[in-house]
């Protein structure tokens, strides 16, 4: 009797633990406008056009104000039991890993296999980006600080919420003090917006973007206009989405014979067995459906984080 | 002797009844949002500094009621910004939440209730204005909003930021 009770309790604990939604990872990033106006950028030439690209590493190494702002934001978020990812640490880890990979060879002298896609996937690992910028404005002997903190979904590029404002002018307080004041004063409103977003996600599902692509000249000889029982493949996929999204919420942004982009796809946060799922888990369900008869389409699911997934059809 | 004691007791009873009635009236005013709350400047981390204007026929009661109104305002009303101040949304913005947890808030805002732990009056900030047949008393109050939010989260009234994950 005791044993069966213990087993039931253990099973219940396991179900409760697995029913937790995957926690989004948040990271503070200085905004492009802040990096460029403070000189932390590199110029990259792309097809004759010179583009300014933020140099985050330089900004983090040279700007004490930025480090202070990130530390303060992390402190306030940790107090709400939601610690942030450290961008500085992430850059260091990436460099360390790249160095280790470059030096790793087999006895036969072979290097580690890594596709360019693996490297890109390693770079983008946070789900919500907190874009931070501030500017000091002088009014005669007084100066005040304008501050913006905006949360953006890393995959759907949607703004989740922002806190902004200009502090009271001061003659004595230095920029670091004004910056700390601005962060502390704006944080509660910012967190309320973040909480609204999380509540919405828990109520009407996680919003993801789903891209369907086709390998050129694939062995299966299919594209998105290939017909099955009189229905084009893109419509087959749309029907599956209609059945498997919450309240059939999604929107087909663009489709052609080779590409289909679905945005605002609201996926359930748990699967039918009560396990937390993300874009990757949801998309694997679609891939499994397409691999089965009558379609028998080989496909490759690519991991892009919690909120974005890509399926490439035609080959594995 | 008896002739003196009896009238004295009667006067004391009438006076205490009047004070209780005024307090009850003040509590009713709080529930009907008959107070004004505004930002009083940047506060230290974990607190809000607010100025609360309370209406009452007794200036003394209005001053006592300011702490209650400040905590009530931070939870249910929020306040506007301007002049370097940041406006704040109410902690509990969902409509009907005060009625939903009526028992909790009745006890929380009772005279001598838990609300006292989260508010302290900044001394020397009291302003009294006579408006018609009542007083409008303004006091700057420091509200320990982080502790207040944690208490409401622990009571299950507010959701934690990481709840559900």
Image: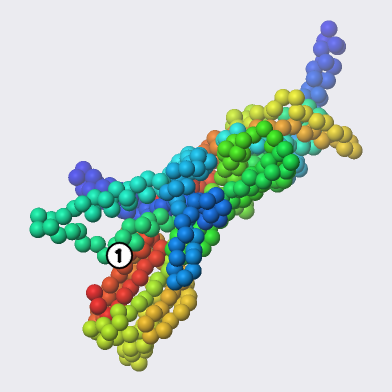
Report the front residue among B116 and B1.
B116
Residue at image location 33% in from the left, 85% down from the top: A223
Residue A193 appears anywhere in the view: no
**Mark 1 Cα within 10 Å, few/some/many (few <14, many 20+)?**
few
Report the front residue among B20 and B41.
B41
Say which residue label 1 marks.
A116
Quick check: A240 left or right of B126?
left
Residue B151 higher or lower than A259, as above or below: above
Identify the image quadrant of the C terminus of chain A: bottom left
Give the image location of residue A96, x and y in percent.
29, 48
Report the front residue among B55 and A4.
B55
Q: Residue furthest left?
A: A108
Residue A98 higher or lower than A182, as above or below: below
- Residue A311, located in which quarter of the rendered image? bottom left
- Residue A188, located in which quarter of the rendered image? top right
Q: Residue furthest right?
A: B132
- Element assignment for label 1: helix
Q: Residue furthest top?
A: B1
Quick check: B5 left or right of A103?
right
> Which chain is disc 1 placed on?
A
């Amino acid at each position: 009797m005791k044993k069966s009770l213990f087993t039931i309790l253990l099973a219940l604990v396991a179900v409760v633990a697995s029913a937790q939604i995957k926690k989004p990872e948040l990271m503070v990033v200085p905004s492009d406008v802040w990096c460029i106006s403070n000189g932390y950028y590199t110029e990259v030439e792309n097809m004759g056009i010179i583009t300014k690209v933020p140099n985050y590493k330089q900004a983090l190494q040279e700007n004490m104000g930025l480090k202070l702002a990130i530390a303060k934001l992390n402190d306030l978020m940790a107090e709400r039991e939601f610690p942030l990812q450290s961008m500085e640490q992430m850059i260091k880890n990436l460099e360390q890993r790249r160095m280790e990979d470059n030096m790793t060879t087999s006895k036969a002298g072979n290097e580690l296999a890594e596709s360019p896609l693996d490297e890109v996937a390693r770079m983008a690992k946070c789900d919500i980006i907190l874009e931070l910028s501030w500017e000091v404005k002088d009014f005669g002997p007084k100066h005040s600080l304008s501050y913006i903190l905006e949360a953006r979904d890393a995959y759907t590029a949607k703004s989740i919420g922002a806190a902004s404002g200009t502090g009271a002018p001061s003659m004595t307080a230095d920029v670091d003090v004004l910056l700390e004041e601005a962060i502390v004063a704006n944080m509660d409103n910012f967190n309320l917006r973040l909480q609204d977003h999380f509540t919405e996600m828990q109520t009407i599902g996680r919003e993801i973007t789903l891209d369907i692509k086709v390998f050129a000249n694939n062995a299966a000889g299919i594209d998105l206009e290939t017909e099955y029982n009189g229905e084009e493949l893109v419509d087959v996929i749309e029907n599956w989405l209609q059945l498997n999204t919450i309240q059939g919420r999604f929107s087909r942004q663009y489709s052609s014979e080779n590409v289909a982009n679905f945005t605002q796809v609201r996926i359930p946060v748990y699967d039918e067995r009560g396990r937390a799922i993300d874009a990757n888990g949801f998309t694997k369900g679609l891939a499994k459906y397409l691999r089965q008869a009558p379609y028998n389409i080989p496909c490759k699911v690519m991991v892009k984080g919690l909120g974005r997934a890509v399926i490439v059809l035609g080959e594995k | 002797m008896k002739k003196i004691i009896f009238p004295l007791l009667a006067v004391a009873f009438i006076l205490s009844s009047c004070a209780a009635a005024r307090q009850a009236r003040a509590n009713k005013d709080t529930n009907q949002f008959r107070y004004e709350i505004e930002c009083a400047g940047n506060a230290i981390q974990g607190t809000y500094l607010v100025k609360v204007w309370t209406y009452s026929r007794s200036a003394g009661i209005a001053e006592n009621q300011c702490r209650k109104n400040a905590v009530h305002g931070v939870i249910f009303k929020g306040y506007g910004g301007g002049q370097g101040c940041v406006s704040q949304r109410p902690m509990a913005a969902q409509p009907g939440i005060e009625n939903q947890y009526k028992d909790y808030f009745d006890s929380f805002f009772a005279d001598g209730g838990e609300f006292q732990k989260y508010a302290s009056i900044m001394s020397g900030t009291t302003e009294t204005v006579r408006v018609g047949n009542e007083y409008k008393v303004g006091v700057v109050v420091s509200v320990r909003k982080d502790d207040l939010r944690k208490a409401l989260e622990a009571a299950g009234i507010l959701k934690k930021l990481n709840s559900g994950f």
